[in-house]
Amino acid sequence: MSNDKIWKSNSTFILAAAGSAVGLGNIWKFPYMVGSNGGSAFVLVYLLCILIIGLPIMASEILIGKYGRKSPINSLKKISLDFNLKRHWKYLGVIGAFAGVLILSYYSVFAGIAFSYMFNIFPPGLENPSNYSTEYFSNIAASPLKLIFWHSVFMIITCMIVGYGVIKGIGRSVSLLMPILFLFIVLVAIYSSLIGDINKTMIFLFNPDFSALTPKVIISAMGQAFFSLSIGMGAIMAYGAYIPEKQLIGKTVFLIIILDTFVALIAGIAIFPIVFNNVDLSINAGPSLIFETLPVAFYSLPYGSIFSIIFFILLSIAALSSAISLLEPFTAWMEERLKFKRKIIVFVLGISIWVIGLGSIFSFNLWSEVKIMGFTFLSGLDYLTNNIMLPVGGFFIALLVGWYLPRNLIKKELGTNESYLKSFFFCLKYVSPGSILLIFLYSIFQ
Ligand code: PFF
């Protein structure tokens, strides 16, 4: 990747990073993870993980990217050379690139479903829209052909954007459309609170219930924090390579994290009031939750189908801007290594990801009974990437920056006051890697 590939104004990095971070993870995944993991206990651990693990690791990734000014693997290589470290650190980037490809394979399946919902207009006069909605999703999920069609559409668009290197173009559209998406979600949340059960929602999300804290809840909340912030695999590192020299990392990271967390919580507030108000909808629905719930909310709104179309267009664009950052690290690495044309690399990668995605599609239907250790292909891949690969990546990033890089470099780049700096170092050296390790051990031995 060369520096001229990305636009360079001060807000550029924030927009690019927010474009990567805010996506299906916030709007689709966070609510259903909360729903299937006991509500407030999950939210509490999630918020804690964002603060004590996510923040320091995100800052570290940006720092490595900014220092190296190259693709994640080569930035890591440069750092190990410059500071006389072992060359093995670059493998962090390699694992991350693979994680991105694996995540994209199922991300694309759900983004495809979001695409298809742009065309899901409920017929007027339905007696039971909730029933209609759950049946509509079941029909899509039961049809491999429909899922393959939409998965293909999403992969083709993602590959075209990454292949042509038109990240600039998407950057511009994201900067326009993201604020509209935020506004939209806030409006939907207000509307849902008015027509649904907001009291129950608030208790479910925010009234701590420690009895629900299980190893599964804790490791899932940590995995979700990594996934939602796009950290642990080099996506944010890749964007860090383009951050203007003068931009300070400390403040920037805060902004991205607040934005990302805000969107996730608001998505929860948009969805749960409807679920609690509706006997036909279930908080335990899993990945289908938003697809079954939001259309019901829109249905009761005047001009609801127009809102529904706009919402799913915006969601699809948010998914696209995240998908690009999932594909970019592997593409950049291959481009530097193989010296093939970018388009050819993306073509081959795209086909491979598409094929892996078929496994996730069949997990809904043809292979739904095929399980290894209780996991379907899709849930296994999700667990492997979010709960293992991303946290392991984050663990080593924290070790690298916390223990091996000069303190002065970090101090200069963060640009924050002394007391913030002290807590930052403490988190990075001990709390972040320590918590990741503890959560792993806890989930293995419980
Ligand atoms: N953070 C994205 C989301 O919330 O949808 C997903 C994602 C993008 C995960 C990029 C990891 C990543 F590197």
Image (cartoon, rainbow, N blue to C red):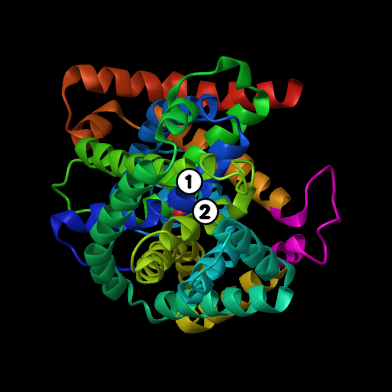
> What amino acid is at disc 2?
Thr
Viewer-side residue, 325 vs 291:
291
Q: Is residue 318 visible?
A: yes
Which element carries disc 1, helix, strand or loop?
A: helix
Residue designated by label 2: 293
Chief SS of the magenta region: loop
322 relative to 47, above or below: below
157 relative to 73, above or below: below
Per the rendered image, the range of residues in magenta is 359-378
- Looking at the rendering, which quadrant does residue 198 occupy? top left
Q: Position of residue 93 (x, y in %)?
A: 51, 51
> Within 8 Å of ligand 1, the CB of disc 2?
no
260 relative to 423, above or below: below
Viewer-side residue, 432 vs 84:
432
Q: Is residue 266 left or right of residue 255?
A: right
* Residue 79 falls within the magenta-colored stretch: no
Q: Is residue 366 left or right of residue 419?
A: right
* Residue 371 falls within the magenta-colored stretch: yes
Q: Mark 1 touching mark 2, by CB under 8 A?
A: yes
Q: Position of residue 69 (x, y in %)?
A: 30, 56
Total number of numbered labels?
2
Q: Is residue 344 left or right of residue 238?
A: right
> What amino acid is at disc 1?
Ile
Closer to the N terminus: mark 1 or mark 2?
1
Which element carries disc 2, helix, strand or loop?
A: helix
Residue designated by label 1: 274
